[in-house]
Amino acid sequence: MTALENRPAERATPAPAKGRRPWGRPAMYTGYGQDMALLNTGAKKAALAVLLVVALLLPFVLEDELLRLLATGAVLAIGAIGLNLVTGYAGQVSLGHAFFLGIGAYTAAVVSGETGDEDLYGFGITFIPVWLLAGGAMAALVGLVVAPLASRLRGLYLAIVTLGLVFLGEHVFREWDAVTGGVGVGRPAADPVLFGVDLSRSTDAFSADQQMYLLMTALLVLFALLGRNIARSAIGRSFAAVRDRDIAAEVTGVDVRKAKRLAFVISGFYAGCAGALLYSISGYLDPSSFGLLVSVQFVAMVLIGGVATISGSIMGAFFIAILPRLTRELPEYLPFLSSSATEFPNVFQVETLLYGLLIVAFLIFEPRGLFGVWVRARNYWKSWPFSY
Amino acid sequence: MSSTTTRRRVAAASLAGLAVFAAGCRGGSEDPADGGGGEGGSIATDVGVTSDPCPEAVNPDNGCIYLGTLSDLTVGPFAAAGPTIVAGQEAFWNRVNEDGGIGGYDVNVSEYVRDNQYNPQVTNQVYQEIKPDILGLAQTLGSPPTASIVEDLAAEDIVAAPAGWTSLYLFQDVILESGPTYCAEAMNGVDYAAETYSAESVMAVHYAGDYGGDAAAGASVAAEANGLDFANVETTAGTDNQSAAVAAIVDQQPDVVVVSTGPADMATIVGQSVAAGFQGRFLGSSPTWNVALLQSPAAPALTASYQLLGPWGPWDTDSPGHEAMREAAGDTTPNEFFLSGWVWSYPMKAALEAAADSGDLTREGLATASAALESVDYEGILPEGSGNYANGGDAAAVRTTQLSDVSADASTGVTVAEADLEGSTAEGYEFTEPCYEAIDLG
């Protein structure tokens, strides 16, 4: 029949389904690639693109002070992702995050420090990737050493033992003057030099804070991508198995000890990198900065942001970073609060109170944290105006 | 390309475009040339100087020079002193403003006061916060905290008046120190002890860093010059942390102990040592005294065994500067730290006046003017010829100390026992580098 013969040859296999979903049916996956993709709906892709564009344009819109705050938030987010990987995804409670931060910070400071200084060690290598990876690697190594603890202890006991790490670290940093300079004296932190340009000093094109913000945001995107991919890979799935029922996981063939070891190593690496970067923003390090409060702050970031989510860690970190700034504005609206630390009540006390209050409030009312709040909002608008 | 994809791409692009459009709103903070001109626009200015008047200005027609303050206001070992020093400085600059200001500008030292917690890292942080808005620093308290920002100060030409006396400042052009260094002070103290108390052994109990280390270095040099035994004991801040120092004193029984800590810690050390039967003498560096110690349980021990090595005459001294200070203080409780804040401000005033006279109140102009100062008028509080910053560290080093006894009758609890004390060690010593770097304390 002419009609059949003249029809152009149909393709034997259906067209690839990628990108061909009907409008308004984002969850209709027609191919494995689509389902497994990092950004598996169009909305996610668009949202991420907009977010990245806004993040890149912020340095031209915001003042230096806010940019510095955001840069700090970005670095804290890197640390929070690390803690979330070990505590949220792998279920190994770690209160020792401050210790790994300190190791990373001091390794980077030593690698980048001035050579020839009699009082302090220094190797003079200020190129960012070198000291950053050195800091991360050293902290990861210590994480490897600490990991066997997790194989023998669980839950509250592991938390107490990792807490001990913080005090061990405090003692070492206090006493090892050649590395840390000693209590009350301190040492300069790592210099962020990239291809000969010192990013912590203003140049003609950009101010110091703009440069540091862009650097930290770029690194955050990198580390977040890495973290997300770890979480949705076989490693991430073995972490989740260990967290949910480690005995069952062992029975089904997951190497629990290896998973726990890997969790500590990865979180150590993230914490080390975060520590190295955090102090390159302000430029100076004092050994008393790696106490219990820092560990608690990171736990707060993870709990408030959302356990076992990467975007939750980022949200929680930015929230905690911006919180002091917000509380400082409170005296305008609550006149009985004073901004001077010598009076009572004052904003610093409110800030300390808030950490605890927020953790409790989020655990009771929204256990999934800020990420849970986002999910609720998203679900509401997905079915609006039929949101009941 | 399907219509939905195109629609989405257009939406994303227009959002981005909106953001670019909004990019003009940054507000010029990357441009440091923020100041207005002076009266008639004849004085060049850049950061920290505005043609608008200061908030609550004394002279509403004047512009405003903003100076920052980094002080220990809450938790460090000098938390009791910090606010008093700030008050002394505010009184000083208020008097300057009432006399018409400098070059058509009032000077404001209240707007950018920040707490540095005597912690080098916090100092660095809060300094970065106020840096874009100030011409210089009216006060930076603590030698170790200042050490964390001194490089940046030098790099950015920010002139600072330190609330401290370490010998490092002799060699920093942007730092306008006043009075003898801890090093020279300790040398004078040890010389005095060797002569008056026939001391044969000296112990230095001090904080780590360039306050305590400086004084200990000076004590060590003078001990060697006089043939005395020297012992070095480091201690950390906090009244709970002095038991090791007290134990060392009671164990080794030196004839004289040079103490270089904060006031509360010094009182703890003296009080507990005397209670344990120690009978030697204590000589404290300038920052160790606070009149409030007379109300503490250590007061009898202090009165009996302690003497202050001070940089200038105490509150009751008769001199035009002291008189002006007492008048400006009004009803404020007399306190040596108020006087210190007052005195520390003289070089900054001289530098600002010199810079305004040469028509350049930019950071660079102020830095050049301060480095060129050959003398500062302290209104009699410090001798003539003080404040010679132009001729190198050794010439700038003041070598006279005022030795004071504790006395409940004096307004601030101390009266001068030996005025203008200058020992042979300090007189003959040549300052070529900071003492704590030159001397190895072991």
Image: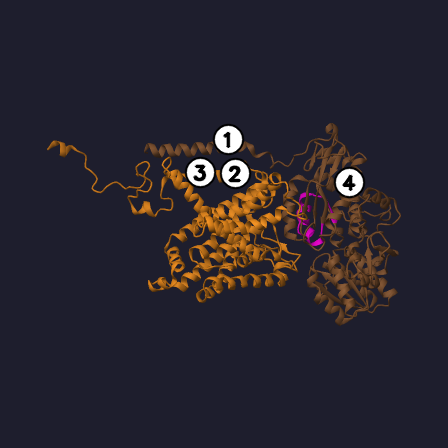
Which residue bears the numbered disc 2?
A58
Q: Is residue A273 left or right of residue A287?
A: left
Letter of the chain that mark 3 sits on in the rendering: A
Q: Report the quarter where the C terminus of chain B lies.
A: bottom right
Q: Secondary structure at mark 2?
A: helix
Most extreme residue toward the left is A1
Residues at discs 4 and 1 in contact (Cβ within 8 Å): no
Compute the Cα span from label 3 to label 2: 12 Å
Q: Secondary structure at mark 1?
A: helix
Same chain check for tags 4 and 2: no
Most extreme residue toward the bottom is B251
Which residue bears the numbered disc 3?
A50
Letter of the chain that mark 2 sits on in the rendering: A
Rendered hue of chain A is orange
Chain letter, brown: B
Residue A293, picture quadrant = bottom right
Q: Is residue B279 visible?
A: yes
Residue A310 on the magenta span = no
Letter of the chain that mark 1 sits on in the rendering: B
The mark that comes first in sequence, 3 or 2, is: 3
Compute the Cα span from label 4 to label 2: 40 Å
Which residue bears the numbered disc 1?
B21
